Image (cartoon, helix red, strand yellow):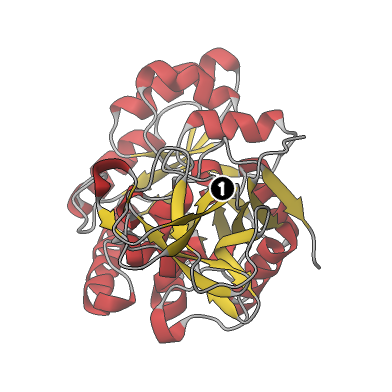
Amino acid sequence: MSTRPAWLEIDTDAITHNVKLVRDFVGAETKVLAVVKANGYGHGLVEAAEASLRGGAAMLGVAILDEAAALRDAGITAPILVMGPVLPEEAEDAVSLGCHLVVADVDTPVALSSAAQKLGRTVSVHLKVDTGMNRVGIRPEDAGIVGHAIANLPGIQLVGLCSHLATGEEDLGFVIYQLGKLQQAEEELRKVGIAPVVRHLASSASTAACPQTWLDMVRIGLLVYGIPAGGAFCPSGLRPALSLKARLTQVKRARSGCTVGYGRTYTLTRDSVLGVVPLGYADGFPFHLSNRGRVLVRGRWANVLGRVCMDQFVVDLTDIPEVRVGDEVVVIGRQGTRLQTVADLAERAGSIPHAILAGLSTRLPRKFIRTA
């Protein structure tokens, strides 16, 4: 067990609660896919997956085959959708995992068909349509031709139709535009006798803000982990699942006029008390919080002084009485009456919550708790 004085606390019961909350929000006719890619948004891949399934998730979403393999190795037999690309040379590995796969061309399904026949398996695929993000997917008008070619391959079942939203509640007009493009693709499929069983488009934000996008299944990421999405439409009662904490490893005095850290980017304007926090950008604490971040110590705000280092950073403790080595530092989470959310941290860093969470290093010990 790690004794490092910096760690993550992850409440898996909060994840279960959040998934159940969304499941109840969208109703029984719409399934919930819990996105657990990127190590469960930093919360732990397997632990986030298990907690999501306890909350009623019908499917798990990952980005790469390695993540799917890790879930299978952990004994998770629930349906998994590999949302990222699968290259033809990965076809046998992909088929052997028994996952649903997203496809956006014909070449990959051909390779999957060959692998499925070789292994005596059938693989379920979801056809991805580019409805306006201009990243991955076929054109809506090509869905009939491509879908027909895929559906006639031996060992392949075309079960899903999906796309990816470029915006959320901040531009609902474009969300509706993309929904229309997906519906156009569905019509093209129906013209050739294909009726997708699972249509999915909604992200966390559109799940909250735009019920028209729910279709047969919603794909939620931030909402799983208790992070609001969808603006004013966000379901109430979400519980943040993650806290980032540390303990002060040094407390020292420094005179006015001294400089702090690499590059001497901060000059003290008064005699000060400084504290060292054993977290750095190697752990996922953003370098962009140099001279602009803040943390909680003894229930009070302590500003980051100087540059964030690879393994530690310095904070101003001057106005916090009786502070000492070993005191708890809260980087994300609540201490006393004050709270710093992932969104707060991201805003100060000029980033987004997704990037903060995905950047939390595996070298940070993760302590899993259950608060029911």
Where is residue 331? Give x, y as percent.
53, 60
How dense is the environment of label 1, judged by Cα within 10 Å: few (below 14), some, or many (20 and up)?
Answer: many
Identify the element where label 1 is drawn.
Answer: helix
**Three-letter code for the amino acid on which mark 1 is drawn:** Gly
Does 134 sit above or below residue 181?
A: above
The quarter of the rendered structure image containing the N terminus is top right
Q: Is residue 45 left or right of residue 175?
A: right
- Position of residue 79 relative to residue 31, above or below, is above
- The part of the image, by quadrant, that contains residue 205 is bottom left
Residue 181 quadrant: bottom left
Left or right side of 91 for 119: right
- According to the picture, the residue beneath numbered tag 1 turns out to be 40
The quadrant holding residue 268 is bottom left
Residue at 29% of width from left, 31% of height from top? 106
Question: Residue at (52%, 47%) from the top-left corner?
Answer: 61
Residue 304 spot, x, y in % from top left:
40, 60
